[in-house]
Amino acid sequence: MAAQIDKTDRKILAELQRDAGQSLEEIARRVGASKTPVWNRIRKLRETGVIGNQTVVVNPEAVGFEACFFVLIRTSAHDADWQADFLRALRSRPEVQEAHRLAGDIDYILKVRVANARAYDAFYQALISQVRVFNVTALLSMEEIKSTTALPL
């Protein structure tokens, strides 16, 4: 269920998505409000779970993660034990940036960041040693055209 947020909350959220490191004074100026009400709204947005963890976006290539693979996984096992093992395996692998369970022919898609193809192979070997899968297809991203965490508020 979506939280009840108004136009001012959306402006604040848009500013935080653009740059969460900007000062409270700057956010208040940009949304046309004073600092105290903006701070109270931000606090409420955190308390209600609208705002989650604040992080820093690191340029992957600048720190040696030059390869991004999208990994399509099909499984013949759908029981609770297999799913628990699979989730445990994914959570133990820091290379996995995103994991989604899908509807359709593919059961899961993973976004995996690694240094190179050799590092992907090490990830793949570790994954299949932890959990049984029916089919794995890895797609190498040749170019990242758009990447954002910002929602269209």
Image (cartoon, helix red, strand yellow):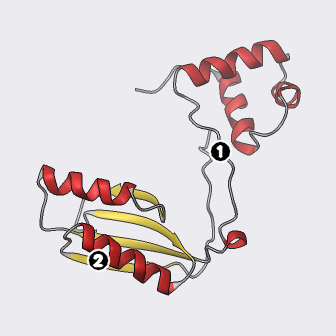
Q: Residue at x 45, y 79 (%)?
A: 120
Quarter of the image that includes the N terminus: top left
Query: Measured from the top left, where is residue 117 in percent x and y?
Result: 49, 85
Q: Is residue 5 visible?
A: no
Depicted 38 relative to depicted 26: above or below: above
Q: Residue at x 82, y 30 (%)?
A: 27
Depicted 4 relative to depicted 123: above or below: above
Q: Residue 21 lies in what quarter of the image?
A: top right
Is disc 1 placed on a helix, strand or loop? Answer: loop
Give the number of the disc on residue 136.
2
Q: Alpha-carbon neighbours of circle 1 within 10 Å: few (<14), some, or many (≥20)?
A: few
Query: Measured from the top left, where is residue 131 in percent x and y?
Result: 23, 67
Q: Residue 41 lies in what quarter of the image?
A: top right
Q: Residue at x 60, y 23 (%)?
A: 45
Query: Measured from the top left, where is residue 78 in percent x and y?
Result: 13, 57
Q: Nearer the viewer, residue 61 or 85?
A: 85
Give the number of the disc on residue 55.
1
The Cα–Cα distance between marks 2 and 1, rounded to whole angstroms, is: 31 Å
Q: Is residue 25 visible?
A: yes
Q: Nearer the viewer, residue 69 or 122?
A: 122
Q: Amino acid at mark 1?
A: Thr
